[in-house]
Amino acid sequence: MNTPTPPLSISAVERETGLSKDVLRKWEARYGFPQPLRDEFGERIYPPEQVERLRLIKRLMDTGMRPSKIVGKDAATLLSLAATRHVAAPQSEALETRAVELLRQHDPEGLRQTLYRMLLRQGLARFVQDTISPLNHAVGEAWARGELEVYEEHLYTEAVQWVLRNALAALSDRQGRPRVLLTTLPEEPHGLGILMVAALLALEGAYCVTLGPQTPVAEIANAVKAQAIDVVVLSFSIIYPPRRIPPALEELRQRLAPAVEIWAGGAGTARLHRAPAGTRLLPTLEDALAALGQWRSAHAGLLSSVVSVEATSQT
Amino acid sequence: MNTPTPPLSISAVERETGLSKDVLRKWEARYGFPQPLRDEFGERIYPPEQVERLRLIKRLMDTGMRPSKIVGKDAATLLSLAATRHVAAPQSEALETRAVELLRQHDPEGLRQTLYRMLLRQGLARFVQDTISPLNHAVGEAWARGELEVYEEHLYTEAVQWVLRNALAALSDRQGRPRVLLTTLPEEPHGLGILMVAALLALEGAYCVTLGPQTPVAEIANAVKAQAIDVVVLSFSIIYPPRRIPPALEELRQRLAPAVEIWAGGAGTARLHRAPAGTRLLPTLEDALAALGQWRSAHAGLLSSVVSVEATSQT
DNA sequence: TTAAAAATATGTCATAGACAAAATGGTTGA
DNA sequence: TCAACCATTTTGTCTATGACATATTTTTAA
């Protein structure tokens, strides 16, 4: 009934796991795993079990573990390690399993509908915080366990984006303040986070421009000028190397006028001690709302003179 | 004003151009191009001009040219080659340049609006055929000339998807016939084509399920059964190796009940001589409409008994 | 404790050659 | 005239091994 999963070539494994060919070969030499079979031409072929383990290892490494600690471990140990990683117990198991089920049945329409109904029932704010957030985790873990294929994760992402963008379109108010630009840096492909933040901020009356993921810094600077942006929100997922976040933020800080605030959100920022000067961390969605409130009170008296401020800041 | 584009490392060039590190090194050895400089550690660094040329070369290769014919050529020659490739002169230059402009200004909202207004003015069918199709070309070429960054192309894709999905949602009719499943195979990442076809078919009253791109064959078979699908539409873009299309179609043909039709569309199918037995090629969008008409007349007398046919075909 | 320095771990890059897979071009047979 | 076949060439991917930059951890000094 399910996919029969034949053994994979090294490029296929690279595609499936995100581990480069070089890394796969080096691990084999250094840690003795993976240990692919060879085909008739002496080329590596990886049995599904090993691909499975590699997927798990990749997932654990994305949460900060080091290869030497985990590459040797067997699948069971890896799974238990993965289990100890997340503390928060999901409150609405039912929805999550239902969503994963719909994914597996390839019913994108049904998934969108389910999500949209949930949105109507809960309201946008609770929907984003209590439903989408845990769902993201559930889907991510299902994928790491090999229960979902890559394209099924795509399906999920598309459905969520669809629902959130719809909501955003309805909320869009060009007079809203602050004017917020949301995007990710070129090395960060995950764009769901910014949509979630955008939804929350737009609900509170901010004007949100979501650029989509992977915008070069120079282009962010252009967009900020062109659209008279007050706040830039960047999202860093768990896969973004934490060490690279501060320098990236500092570079952006230098390129933007000091009046433009820089907020950094996403799971990747949770591991940071403190924010670089002139930037702000938003490890959770609540922090985004708090930051918005503070921006508002800081600019409360100035809102009437905003137009002139923008005009000068565009030089 | 524009991006300053520093010299790039070999991985960066791989990311930018889609040419693997192995290929970049081999071309250097075989054809003498690219000829990257070396940094202080002896590692390759590619000046922007060479990256530019590589981008053009990749684009030309995607249209079927061979490396030996073009890797040596200079940028001007490559551009003229690219120019001779497309015959059809775009009729509404204005719109195309306007869209590219909006992209460059990072105004996704504005782009969506422009597209949506165009849709309302022209109607969905003309919008897809006369506007989106040439726009796709224009954007693709702008990208090959280096006028757009990767993420700007994403922006475009997202905007078009947004507009088309919106239209599709409004048209969706669960009673519609035939029931059409649209997707691409795992090696084909481009998903715009199926949305365009879906829009046209849905407009004519078909029920369309768009699975998103990169669905494994086994999963297509599952979905076909689960949703009582009459027709599977696959899209092959210009980058799909033409030689692999027939075997792929044949494999799918074997996995599906004979009553389920298989149509293959997209620019990749234009180069094929004839369709494998039991499948049908749709090199142009008009062909899709024609195929729909023929399906309808072939099943005209049976439409009343469709329900029972489905019930038995699901065994 | 904090900070700097040394040691270790890890990923990326380089070279060079083997060879499968794809494409081309010519030949044969319908 | 066209398609199918085979030989030849082209082209991309893979193997193997080692160097070394960069990231992380540990140790040492302040």
Image: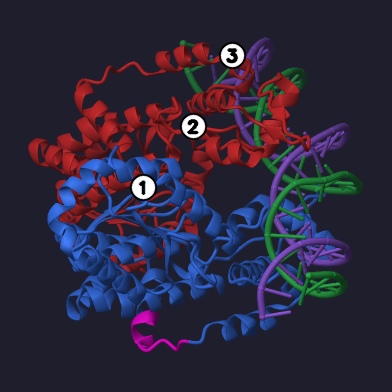
Chain colours: A blue, B red, C purple, D green
- Residue designated by label 3: B73
- What residue type is disc 3 on? Lys
Q: Are marks 1 and 3 in contact (CB under 8 Å)?
A: no
- Tell which of C29 and B208 is nearer to you: B208
Q: Mark 1: few, some, or many residues within 10 Å (few <14, many ≥20)? A: some
Q: Are marks 1 and 2 on the same chain?
A: no
Residue at 28%, 48% in the rendered image: B161
Q: Quadrant of the C terminus of chain A?
A: top left
For the residues marked 3 and 2, what is the alpha-carbon distance in whole angstroms?
Answer: 25 Å
Helix, strand or loop at mark 2 = loop
Tell me if residue B126 can be seen.
Answer: yes
For residue B110, above or below residue A288: above
Counting from the top left corner in percent of width and height, residue C10 is at 74, 61
For residue D1, above or below residue B182: above
Q: Are marks 1 and 3 on the same chain?
A: no
Q: Mark 2: few, some, or many residues within 10 Å (few <14, many ≥20)? A: few
Could you say which quadrant of the image residue B237 lies in? top left
Disc 2 is attached to a residue of which chain?
A: B
Q: Is residue A253 left or right of residue B171?
A: right
Helix, strand or loop at mark 1 = loop
- What residue type is disc 2 on? Pro
Disc 1 is attached to a residue of which chain?
A: A
- Residue designated by label 2: B4
In the drawing, what numbered circle is on residue A257? 1
Residue at 51%, 11% in the rendered image: B77
